[in-house]
Image (cartoon, rainbow, N blue to C red):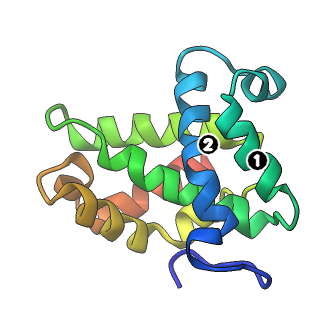
Amino acid sequence: PPMESCDTCPGGEACHGHNLRPVLRRVFALHSAGVTNKFELLDRLSEEDEALLEEHARGLTAVCWSKAALLATTDLLAELPAGGEPPTVVEERLRAVVAAFERFPWRIGDLVTVAPELHQLVVDQAGDDAPVGALGRRAFVNLCKRVVWDR
């Protein structure tokens, strides 16, 4: 599966990865605004985010964090505005995502493993004309490899 679930995943709306997706999106926004310390990031999350973290903290695995990070990455790539050079804007966003999420226990290498599926999820969400769609699947996979391996 493109984004696996842990062995004890309750599935659907109760999935830890699914529920942590919005928290990581807000982590990305804070990181983009210059808040880079993990503890400061956590301190600046809303009460709603803290409640989600507390509710889903039990049973969280690297698989859960990876799923949340990849789902949030899908959203963040789909939100890229049209215009600019697709390779440049997509690479900049991917590097920013990895930088924002790297202090969390997700498997960053999964970005490469699921790159083809991630490309399709982003295109399904944003359309073929969005930067990721304009980039094409093979170029996106290569870009993911470069971002992960050049860290």
Examine the rendered structure and indicate whether residue 34 appears above or below residue 103: above
Residue 81 on image: x %, y % = 21, 35
Badge 2 element: helix
Label 2 Cα neighbours within 10 Å, binned few <14 / some 14-19 / many ≥20: many
In the rendered structure, find residue 143 and report the number of the disc placed on it. Answer: none
| CB contact under 8 Å: marks 1 and 2 | yes
- Residue at x 31% of width, y 36% of height: 88
Q: Say which residue label 1 marks.
A: 53
In the rendered structure, find residue 23 and report the number of the disc placed on it. Answer: 2
Q: Quadrant of residue 4?
A: bottom right
- Residue at x 73% of width, y 56% of height: 106
Residue found farthest to the right: 58
Label 2 amino acid? Val
Distance between mark 1 and mark 2 Cα atoms: 8 Å
Name the image quarter holding the C terminus: top right
Whether residue 30 sits left or right of residue 91 in the image: it is right
Examine the rendered structure and indicate whether residue 66 appears above or below residue 10: above
